[in-house]
């Protein structure tokens, strides 16, 4: 089977890009945790889980080809992440109730997360209009997309593992404290 | 407990990476349900907005 670019290959590449963006957000959150010495709160950790879940959905499309079930998974994950993010925004929406962590480019991380999850929902809705992506393609996926998918699977897996370690250090085996102490691990 | 959720997600990624699509999707949905339960557990404060 020859490799080439058709509608399905383009959609696969866009899904790779989507996974790259959401994993980048998780890496950014890690940077804030260690550079600014801010331990993530439980809702922040749930937002990270939402990002990983969305990235996983994107990678399903990139690895196995676009399918409605994969998009459904992305939408469920993005709705979960958006719900957590908006909960945290609402906790601090009243003036004088403070905020959690420092702002990055003018917005707090949970506000950025809400924007990312909303954009994902919008992008998936638009992507699903291109019905030719669901037809069997005579072309194999381009090598660039295949390799990028493999690398991103490794990154997603390692990010989840790394979070196992850092979350265990921060929270132990019980539930995480609602208001962690200052420092990278609270 | 939160670490356990991340561990499950690591397993979900590994399953899909290994080509086990159906199992990965079911495990992912299960993990998502656990995430929702954890979210519910951490909603401890009431939001008081005076409109």
Image (spheres, rainbow, N blue to C red):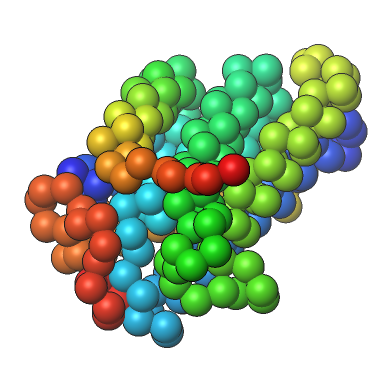
| Residue occupying image coordinates x 25% and y 55% | A178
Residue B22 placement: quadrant: top left
Q: Measured along the vertical axis of the image, is residue A6 above or below residue A91?
A: above
Query: Is B5 on the left or on the right of A102, as rendered?
Result: left
Estimate the x, y position of residue A8 in percent, counting from the top left. 81, 30
Estimate the x, y position of residue A3 in percent, counting from the top left. 80, 38
Residue A159 placement: quadrant: bottom left
- For the C terminus of chain A, which image quadrant? bottom left
Residue that lies at the very extreme toward the front in this rendered image? B51
The answer to whether residue A185 shows anywhere in this view is yes
Nearer to me, B27 or A154:
B27
Query: Is A31 on the left or on the right of A95, as rendered?
Result: left
Estimate the x, y position of residue A75 in percent, counting from the top left. 61, 29
Nearer to me, A165 or A114:
A114
- For the N terminus of chain A, which image quadrant? top right
Estimate the x, y position of residue A98 in percent, counting from the top left. 45, 68
Query: Is A103 on the left or on the right of B5, as rendered?
Result: right
Q: Measured along the vertical axis of the image, is residue A88 above or below residue A118?
A: below
| Residue occupying image coordinates x 62% and y 59% | A112
Residue that lies at the very extreme toward the bottom in this rendered image? A35
| Residue occupying image coordinates x 35% and y 81% | A37
Nearer to me, B4 or B11:
B4
């Amino acid at each position: 089977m020859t490799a080439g670019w058709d509608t399905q290959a383009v959609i696969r590449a866009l899904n790779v890009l989507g996974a790259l963006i959401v994993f980048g957000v998780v890496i950014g959150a890690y940077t804030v945790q260690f550079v600014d010495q801010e331990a993530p709160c439980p809702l922040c950790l749930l937002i990270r889980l939402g990002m990983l879940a969305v990235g996983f959905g994107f990678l399903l499309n990139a690895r196995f080809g676009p399918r409605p079930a994969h998009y459904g998974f992305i939408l469920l994950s993005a709705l979960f992440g958006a719900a957590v993010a908006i909960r945290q925004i609402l906790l601090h929406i009243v003036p004088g109730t403070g905020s959690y962590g420092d702002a990055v480019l003018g917005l707090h991380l949970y506000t950025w997360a809400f924007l990312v999850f909303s954009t994902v929902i919008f992008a998936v809705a638009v992507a699903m209009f291109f019905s030719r992506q669901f037809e069997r393609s005579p072309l194999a996926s381009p090598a660039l997309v295949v390799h990028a998918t493999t690398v991103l699977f490794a990154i997603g897996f390692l990010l989840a593992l790394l979070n196992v370690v850092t979350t265990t250090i921060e929270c132990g085996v019980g539930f995480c404290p609602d208001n962690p102490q200052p420092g990278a691990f609270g | 407990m939160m670490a356990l959720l991340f561990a499950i997600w690591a397993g979900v990624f590994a399953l899909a990476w290994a080509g086990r699509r159906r199992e990965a999707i079911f495990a992912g949905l299960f993990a998502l349900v656990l995430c929702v339960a954890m979210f519910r557990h951490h909603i401890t404060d009431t939001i008081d907005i005076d409109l």
